[in-house]
């Protein structure tokens, strides 16, 4: 019955006490939200924690919700703000083993690195590593665009950046990912 309603209408209904409206919103957006958080944070435990926190914040803000922007933009902005807070509290660092492994591979002559065809899994892993190497702002912009299909203006609303800044972040992110795959 509520499946035909827009997300914004469902959120307004939830603000008035319609629990079914919340269930529909949750079903529609849980996958998108979780993927965004997991790719942004890289650790399942962190993504799980912020996934719950995002929904908690949505519940707490339900009466203040205004459909000024798309619901997904609003939801992802809550998540993005939580991700930024997490980054500020704890900057991720490579472990000593990871650092040693990378340095050994850089020092190895090309003739000692075996040629092989990458499987689909290996390509996904390379993309994940390329995403991890991006600066936070570029990674978030890239994920919002590619994973969530958001436009420049919507990404700007979520991240608080101007349209041209978002375009630059996307351009630099794509260039870095392409360079990573070319090497």
Image (cartoon, helix red, strand yellow):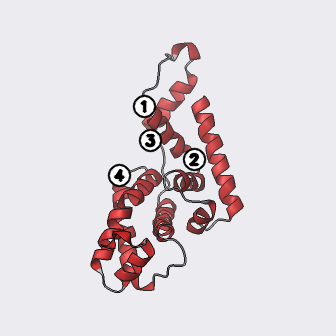
- The relative height of residue 15 versus residue 135 in the rendered view (above or below) is below
- Residue 53 falls in image quadrant: bottom left
**Image quadrant containing the C terminus:** top right
What is the spatial separation of the Cα atoms under label 4 and label 2, in whole angstroms?
19 Å
Mark sitting earlier along the chain (1/3): 3
Residue 134's tag is 2
Q: Which mark is residue 95?
A: 3
| Image disc number at residue 32 | none
Does residue 6 appear left or right of residue 152 in this picture? left
Q: Name the residue beneath numbered marker 4.
A: 44
The disc, 2 or 1, on the residue closer to the chain's N-terminal end is 1
Position of residue 182 relative to residue 14, above or below, is above
* Earlier sequence position, callout 4 versus callout 3: 4
* Residue at x 47%, y 33% (from the top left corner): 123
Looking at the image, residue 119 sits to the left or right of residue 157; the answer is left
| Element under disc 3 | loop
In this image, 16 relative to 101: left or right? left
Residue ID for mark 1:
120
In the displayed structure, would residue 150 be above or below residue 75?
above
């Amino acid at each position: 019955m509520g499946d035909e309603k827009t997300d914004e209408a469902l959120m307004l209904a939830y603000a008035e006490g319609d629990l079914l409206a919340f269930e529909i919103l949750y079903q529609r957006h849980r996958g998108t939200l979780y993927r965004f958080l997991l790719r942004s944070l890289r650790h399942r435990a962190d993504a799980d924690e912020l996934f719950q926190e995002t929904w908690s914040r949505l519940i707490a803000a339900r009466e203040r919700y205004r459909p000024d922007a798309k619901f997904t933009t609003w939801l992802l902005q809550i998540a993005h703000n939580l991700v930024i807070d997490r980054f500020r509290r704890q900057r991720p660092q490579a472990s000593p083993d990871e650092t040693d492994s990378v340095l050994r591979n850089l020092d190895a002559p090309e003739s000692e690195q075996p040629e092989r065809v990458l499987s689909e899994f290996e390509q996904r892993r390379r993309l994940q590593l390329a995403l991890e190497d991006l600066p936070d702002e570029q990674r978030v912009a890239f994920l919002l665009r590619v994973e969530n299909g958001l436009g420049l203006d919507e990404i700007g609303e979520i991240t608080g950046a101007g349209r041209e800044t978002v375009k630059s972040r996307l351009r630099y992110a794509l260039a870095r990912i392409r360079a990573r795959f070319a090497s």
